[in-house]
Amino acid sequence: MKALLIPAMLCMVTVTLAQGTFSVKNETALPRKEVISIPYAQFQREFGLDTNFVVKDHAGNPIVHQVEYRGENQAQNILILVEVADRSSSGYKVEAGKPLHTPSKTYARYVPERYDDFAWENDKVGFRMYGKALEGRADDAQGMDYWAKRTDKLVINSWYKSEDYHRDHGEGLDYYSVGNTLGAGDLAIFEKDKLQYTKHYRNYQILDNGPLRTTFVLSYDPQDFNGQPIALKKTIQLDAGSHFNKISVQLDNSEKKVTRIVLGIAKRKEQQPKYAWNPEKRTLSYWEPNVQENGHTGIALILPKGKHKLHANDAAQFLVETDIRNGKSFVYYNGAAWDREGTVANAEQWNTFVRDESIKLEKPLHVKFN
């Protein structure tokens, strides 16, 4: 029996493949509906199939899968949307056939019609980052924006076309305010205990674009920070059904091997912010007040193992101080939820939701082949 260890977003399941079938085992006390990833080379060796196949659940119903390329010409992984009860297993069958066609649940695109935004979404949440064209304008903003959705439909194209997405017409709205903050979990340089924002992204590359996972890269021009030339790339991945992005940061500092940064969450004006910092689980969750009667938004960070320090006294934002080492990807997760979407309704539920997501990330995905 061969075993392969694979990191997977918000996923801790065991996948066993043999003779056209595989089972997915949920070893946690949490029910799971999420995307699993199987390396394509292993998948092909086990089943002798190319990319023309069907995956069926235990009842024989076709379920959604995606061939993931990660920007390459050859397939890299097979992604499958599975559902498994807590501490139980589900069986699946793979057979040759025409792949099931399904509307995409994830999507990203460059938005040249709106100051070169870059926006992405799934069936739960939406986000965007700002480009060069917005720099220096009165309406410029620094960090990541969040779009509050209450529909499983993809809305980026229709909302930008309508130019009326700051009001809720039944699908949600953009009422999140980024301003001069890191918004919903972006990062900045923290040199000599002073926050220094990077310029906006300059280039993008979409690696995969649904139906189950969208992955893209945002690149930033080298920028000087107190004599330190720093280049930056962010690879952002969003899976169907997830409230969290997986963000892999590649930072190159020509003067230092280690660069101090901060990750941030914007604060709203209230006397006692509802937030929870869990150093053991490395999570920061914040529940916003009801802004202009548009409901409550929850924003959160899940950080990798390492030394992290919370700065909670800044009036504009929560800041988590940490380090990035040259040549090593720094992987963290940021997420959001809106009470009118239906998943969480209050601060306590949001804190529990974030804790559960961190639990799912603590153990890796194990794949065993016969």
Image: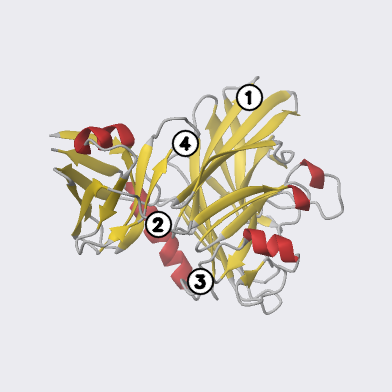
Point out the frontmost of discs 2 and 3: 2
Q: Secondary structure at mark 4?
A: loop
Q: Nearer the viewer, residue 330 or 146?
A: 146
* Three-letter code for the amino acid on which mark 1 is drawn: Asn
* Three-letter code for the amino acid on which mark 2 is drawn: Glu
**Label 3 to label 4, Cα distance in Å?**
36 Å
N-terminal of the two: label 2 or label 3? Answer: 3
- Residue at label 1? 253
Q: Secondary structure at mark 2?
A: helix
N-terminal of the two: label 3 or label 4? Answer: 4
* Three-letter code for the amino acid on which mark 4 is drawn: Arg
Q: Position of residue 70 (x, y in %)?
A: 47, 36
Q: Secondary structure at mark 3?
A: helix
Instruction: Give residue 357's mark.
Output: 2
**Label 1 to label 4, Cα distance in Å?**
26 Å
Q: Position of residue 367 (x, y in %)?
A: 23, 41
Callout 2: 10 Å neighbours few (<14), some, many (20+)? many
Tell me: residue 336, above or below residue 35: below
CB-based contact (under 8 Å), mark 1 and mark 3: no
Instruction: Give residue 347's mark.
Output: 3
Residue 167 shown left or right of residue 248 in the figure = right
Tell me: residue 35, above or below residue 287: above
**Label 2 to label 3, Cα distance in Å?**
15 Å
Q: Position of residue 104 (x, y in %)?
A: 48, 56
Residue 105 shown left or right of residue 198 in the figure = left
Point out the frontmost of discs 4 and 2: 4
**Label 1 to label 2, Cα distance in Å?**
32 Å
* Three-letter code for the amino acid on which mark 3 is drawn: Ala
**Label 1 to label 3, Cα distance in Å?**
38 Å
- Residue at label 4? 70
Instruction: Give residue 68's mark.
Output: none
